[in-house]
Image (tube, rainbow, N blue to C red):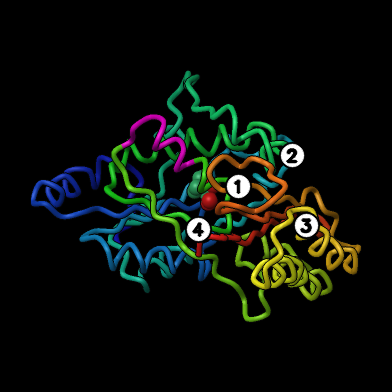
Amino acid sequence: VKIVHKASEFRDHLWGVQKQGFAVGFVPTMGALHEGHLSLIRRSKAENAVTVVSVFVNPTQFGPNEDFDRYPRDLERDAKLALSEKADFLYAPESPEIYRSGFSTYIEETALSRVLCGAHRPGHFRGVLTVVFRLFNLVRPDRAYFGRKDAQQLRLIEKMAEDLGLDVEIAACPTVRDPDGLAMSSRNAYLVEEERAVAPRIYGALRAAEAAFDAGERRSDRLVDLARAVLAACPSFSVQYLELRTWRDLAEADVVSERSVLAVAGVLGKTRLIDNVILDPTR
Ligand code: PAF
């Protein structure tokens, strides 16, 4: 893996690869790489001639009282992990490469971004979409890989690509979990022992609803109630939302009649955690 700080250091190489008809895969991250990120790198390696992994802790997607300052940063460790997966470039831009001085243009989605996490983190998805668009423009990948754990982020990036006609394929990848079910996240590192011990109940709650769905339950309120009952047994997890919405439009529906997502967010101690399961009646 080659660590680069400027897109100009790899652009010509990637362009040469693409001119020969080969594809470039891109895995954008904020670093603190874990098995979830590594699974994205592996998939990109399998599907493309060259894989670029970016590490950039994007200031514009953090709210004023969020964890931008304490977000884990360890480029050397990230480089070792990227190397272990044989990524070709680890792109770690400095802020001015992404946000030039006087930067004042943002990408804002105005419908699907208003619910779920968007309702609790104003400006978050504006920051995410802006940085992803910016990174797409710097890397110019053929495919970009995102985890399903960040379901709304994934849907919004798909929507941005659809709405703005971006020439990049958005590849959705499965959530990677610890053996006890907790979805992997860089923020899990914040959890103290007792919090880590109860954290798997979040997925347990989603699984309870998923099991009922698999057994034929289609009423949204019943499915949400089942998950809520499991979470009620874990009072240290303060739920921000637990909602069932259609995947396409992130709209509420009384009955699950199309591909949908049951999504949860909440705070455990000081750590905000999210998770979701896809409920698909067409499967
Ligand atoms: O999912 C993340 O790590 C970030 O939101 C992303 C997509 C790299 C944008 O900063």
Cα separation between marks 3 and 1: 14 Å
Crowd band around label 4 with a 10 angstrom C-alpha radius: few (<14), some (14–19), many (20+): some
Mark 3: secondary structure:
helix
Q: Which residues are magenta?
A: 157-166
Query: Spatial distance from mark 4 to mark 1, Cα to Cα?
Result: 18 Å
Q: Which residue is mark 1?
A: 246
- Mark 3 vs 2: CB contact within 8 A: no
The disc label shown at residue 147, or none: 4
Q: What percent of the width, then of the height, locates residue 102?
A: 48, 18
Q: Which residue is identified by label 2?
A: 120
- Tell me if the residue at label 3 has its CB under 8 Å from ligand 1: no
Q: Secondary structure at mark 2?
A: helix
Q: Earlier in the sequence, mark 2 or mark 1?
A: 2
Distance in Å between CA atoms under marks 3 and 2: 19 Å
**Residue pictured at 50% horizontal, 65% vertical:** 283
Which residue is the site of mark 3? Answer: 224
| Beta carbon of the mark 4 residue lies under 8 A of ligand 1 | yes
Amino acid on which the number 2 mark rests in the picture: His
